[in-house]
Amino acid sequence: MKISLVVALIGLAIGIALPSFAETNTPDPQQREQLLALAKKFEEAWNNNDAEALAALFTKDAVLIEESGPVYGREAIKKHYADLFQNVHFSNNHTMYNDPNSNSPHAIGTDGNMMWENGEWSVTWQAKGGEPVQGKGFHASIAVREDGVWKKRMVMVNVTPAPAK
C-alpha cells in the first residue's frame, strides 16, 4: 500500500513538473547571433591555446564540468586551462555552427538575461611527444548577461569515444 502511494505521488509530481520544463521561451534571432558570437570567441581562444581569453568568457562564479570533474570559479578555470595548454596543443576547434546539417549550438531557451543551449564540437589535440588526435563530443551551457555581455555561467562537456574497430 505504501509503495503504490509513493509511486502515485512520484508520477503526479513528474506529471506536474514536465509541462513546466517544456515551457521555455525560444531565443529570438538576435540572441542566437549573440550565442554564436560567444561560440566563435571560444573557438578563437581554444585555437590560440589562450587560457586568459578563455577564462574571460566565464562569469566570476562559473562552473566547468568535464570528465576530470568540476572546476569552480573563473580563476580556477583559467588555471585549469593554463595547465592543460602546457601539456596539450589544441587546433581546429569548432562548434558545428558552420555545418549546414547541424543546429549547433542549439538555443534551448531563455528568460531574456539567461540562455541555455547545447551542441556538438570537434577539435584536434596533440599531447607533448604524441600524435595529433581528432576528438569530438557534446556540450551544454548556461550563458548569462554580465554587465551587458554574454558569458558562460556553467559549461558541461563530454568527449565521444571513437567507434570500436
Image (tube, rainbow, N blue to C red):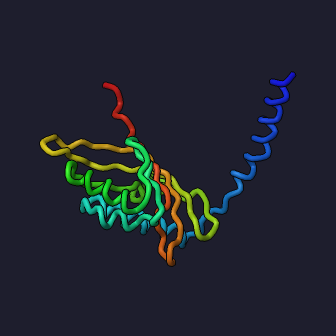
Question: What percent of the width, then of the height, locates residue 67?
Answer: 40, 41
Q: Is residue 125 left or right of residue 97?
A: left
Q: Is residue 144 above or below residue 165?
A: below
- In the picture, residue 15 is in which quadrant? top right
Question: What percent of the width, then of the height, locates residue 90?
Answer: 25, 53
Residue drawn at (39%, 50%) of the image = 121
Residue drawn at (34%, 49%) of the image = 122
Of residue 60 and residue 34, the one placed in the foreground of this image is 60
- Name the residue at the top extreme: 1
- In the picture, residue 130 is in which quadrant? top left
Of residue 62 and residue 107, the one placed in the foreground of this image is 62
Residue drawn at (49%, 51%) of the image = 140
Q: Is residue 157 left or right of residue 53?
A: right
Total marks placed: 0
User: Which quarter of the image is occupied by the C terminus?
Assistant: top left
Q: Is residue 147 left or right of residue 85?
A: right
- Name the residue at the right extreme: 1
Question: What percent of the width, then of the height, locates residue 38?
Answer: 42, 66
Of residue 58 and residue 37, the one placed in the foreground of this image is 58
Residue drawn at (33%, 60%) of the image = 78
- Name the residue at the left extreme: 129
User: Which quarter of the image is occupied by the N terminus?
Assistant: top right
